[in-house]
């Protein structure tokens, strides 16, 4: 007999934040975050691959944020163009979970991508193998992995040495945003990773 742990959580529409008086001045607030040991963002905003093209990635980078270029035919050329325009630019690219994912990520990193967003699917064993290779053999590459909505999968992915999880709904797996993200953050802290 298998016992299953059911975690209930809260979504954003179930949480009320009550504003209070504060002595903090808006112009003194620092929003920067350290995404990984080698990538800092002035704005803690990451644009999704589905909403990003070369111009969006350029604008995000100029404003201290990060937009992830989608996987596809123009990806390598886009990375090369963005790098040619500004050597200091932080460039993120999506890589699909496939047998050639490791080689694709290495090629994109060599072209100038400093962040890889590894897109998970139902082939977890293939992803784990590729992620281990990337984390061990391609430093100082920053590796984000997602979408993840299951803590057991998150633990396996974090054990590969990646830098951050992207917590989001997957088919058949609802995400109760507030509680789930907090639980994943606690798990990621065990591996010195971000969420």
Image (cartoon, helix red, strand yellow):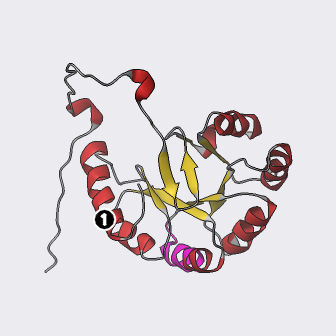
| Residue positioned 44% across, 35% down in the render | 30
| Residue positioned 79% across, 50% down in the render | 87
Horizontally, residue 179 falls left or right of residue 169, namely left
Q: Position of residue 34 (x, y in %)?
A: 49, 52
SS under mark 1: helix
Number of dots carrying numbers = 1
Q: How many residues crowd around disc 1 within 10 Å: few (fewer than 14), some, or many (20 or more)?
A: some
Return the residue at label 1.
187
Main SS type for the magenta part? helix
Horizontally, residue 107 falls left or right of residue 139, namely right
**Would you say residue 52 is visible in this rendering?**
no
**Nearer the observer, 194 or 71:** 194
**Nearer the observer, 178 or 170:** 178
Q: Position of residue 173 (x, y in %)?
A: 35, 54
Q: Quadrant of residue 134?
A: bottom right
Above or below residue 89? Residue 114 is: below
Horizontally, residue 34 falls left or right of residue 110, namely left
**Would you say residue 55 is visible in this rendering?**
yes
| Residue positioned 53% across, 59% down in the render | 144
Q: Quadrant of the N terminus?
A: bottom left
Magenta segment: 122-131
Name, please, the residue furthest toward the top: 21
Task: Verify whether residue 89 appears in magenta.
Answer: no
Q: Position of residue 190 (x, y in %)?
A: 32, 69
Q: Quadrant of residue 56?
A: top right
Horizontally, residue 103 falls left or right of residue 7, namely right
Q: Position of residue 33 (x, y in %)?
A: 47, 47
Above or below residue 143? Residue 139 is: below
């Amino acid at each position: 007999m298998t016992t299953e742990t059911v975690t209930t959580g809260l979504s954003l529409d179930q949480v009320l934040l009550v504003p209070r008086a504060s002595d903090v001045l808006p112009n003194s607030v620092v929003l920067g975050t350290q995404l990984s040991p080698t990538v800092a963002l002035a704005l803690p905003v990451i644009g999704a691959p589905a909403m990003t093209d070369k111009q969006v990635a350029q604008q995000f980078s100029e404003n201290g944020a990060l937009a992830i270029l989608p996987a596809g035919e123009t990806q390598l050329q886009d990375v090369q163009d963005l790098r040619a325009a500004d050597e200091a630019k932080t460039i993120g690219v999506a890589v699909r979970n496939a047998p050639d994912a490791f080689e694709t990520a290495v090629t994109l990193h060599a072209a100038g991508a400093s962040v890889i967003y590894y897109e998970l699917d139902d082939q977890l064993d293939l992803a784990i193998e590729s992620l281990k290779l990337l984390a061990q053999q391609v430093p100082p590459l920053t590796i984000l992995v997602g979408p993840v909505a299951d803590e057991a999968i998150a633990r396996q992915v974090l054990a590969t040495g990646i830098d951050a999880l992207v917590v989001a709904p997957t088919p058949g797996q609802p995400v109760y945003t507030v509680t789930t993200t907090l639980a994943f953050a606690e798990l990621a802290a065990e591996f010195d990773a971000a969420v």
